[in-house]
Amino acid sequence: MTDQDRPDRKSTPADPAATAEDTTGTDAPTPALGDSIAAAARRSGLGQLAETDASTGAALLGALGGIRGLCETILPGLVFLILFTFTQNVPLSIGCSVAVAVVFTVLRVIGKTPLTQALAGLIGVGISAILALITGRGEDNFLFGIWTNAAYAAGILISMLVRWPIIGLAAGYLMGDGVAWRSDKRKFRVMQALTFLWLLLFVARLVVQVPLYLAHTDEATSALALTKLLMGVPLYAPLLLVTWFVVKAQFPQKAAAPRRTVSGR
């Protein structure tokens, strides 16, 4: 083959994903991994807001699972807080908390509605209850949640250190941009900043809750139950909304496009 017969490589458009690789020195996710990230992003609260393309209170409520979803998230912990504060009876407090989670799951089954949120809540409550019943200490009802927050914090921190911020990945695939945003320094910095805010959320929970857990007193256990409620939805919801506002601003054209398209492979 002569030089004239060879394809002109310079005429080939640059691949955004390839550009991103050149700027960071790391490989882009494989197509299969990209599909998984996109699917996970659509199931997240951010994905729910993207589907409605709105920032109203109703849209945020829907992203949180609606009234039923909020009840499934809050009531088991609230029942434990009230009963333990007044009785210091670990089996009673835990038993009633688990019973509430079971009732919500049964109602989902009877109503033939999606079980994901209720089932996840039931599993979390069940694991926490088993730990507390084995040790007989009320504070161990929150040990699983503490370790979960630590795992999320570690995962988010690692994603920032390797320069693949998890919020950027979720937003990129959710908005049909794939990993092309990584070649834009401004977008990359914004995605890192958003991811850092989520890191702060989980770190703040650990900073407040771990000392209360280690205190091993009934008063500290009640305070732990209260802080878990206060640092749950009340912190998660506004941060989710702020994240969606910023993502829409960073991907204004993508925000108006269909959300099911996944690019950047």
Image (cartoon, rainbow, N blue to C red):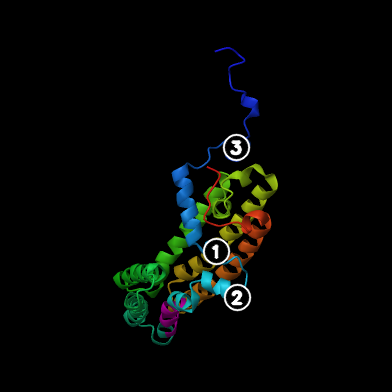
**Magenta-highlighted residues:** 74-82
Visible residue check, residue 227:
yes
How far apart in space, not on screen, are marks 3 and 1 (Cα)?
Answer: 27 Å
Query: Which amino acid does the dot numbered 3 rest on?
Result: Asp
Q: Residue furthest right?
A: 186
- Name the residue that disc number 1 marks: 51
Which of 111/186 is in front? 111
- Contact (Cβ within 8 Å) of mark 3 with mark 1: no
Residue at image point 61% right, 25% down: 9
Q: Give the crowd class for mark 3: few <14, some 14-19, many >=20 residues within 10 Å.
A: few
Q: Secondary structure at mark 1?
A: helix
Query: Quarter of the image holding residue 249?
Result: bottom right
Nearer mark to the viewer, of 1 and 2: 1
**Residue 224: percent from left, percent from top:** 48, 74
In the rendered structure, the answer to whether residue 150 lies left or right of residue 167 reads left
**Residue 195: percent from left, percent from top:** 59, 55
- Name the residue that disc number 3 marks: 15
Q: Residue furthest top?
A: 2
Q: Give the crowd class for mark 2: few <14, some 14-19, many >=20 residues within 10 Å.
A: few
Q: Reading the chain from its start, which is encountered first: label 3 or label 1?
A: 3
- Name the residue that disc number 2 marks: 57
- Residue 247 versus residue 233 in the image, above or below: above
Query: Which amino acid does the dot numbered 2 rest on?
Result: Gly
Residue at image point 64% right, 65% down: 242
Q: Secondary structure at mark 3?
A: loop
Q: Residue furthest front?
A: 5
Query: Which amino acid does the dot numbered 1 rest on?
Result: Glu
**Residue 37: percent from left, percent from top:** 48, 51
Q: Secondary structure at mark 2?
A: helix
In the rendered structure, the answer to whether residue 234 lies left or right of residue 77 reads right
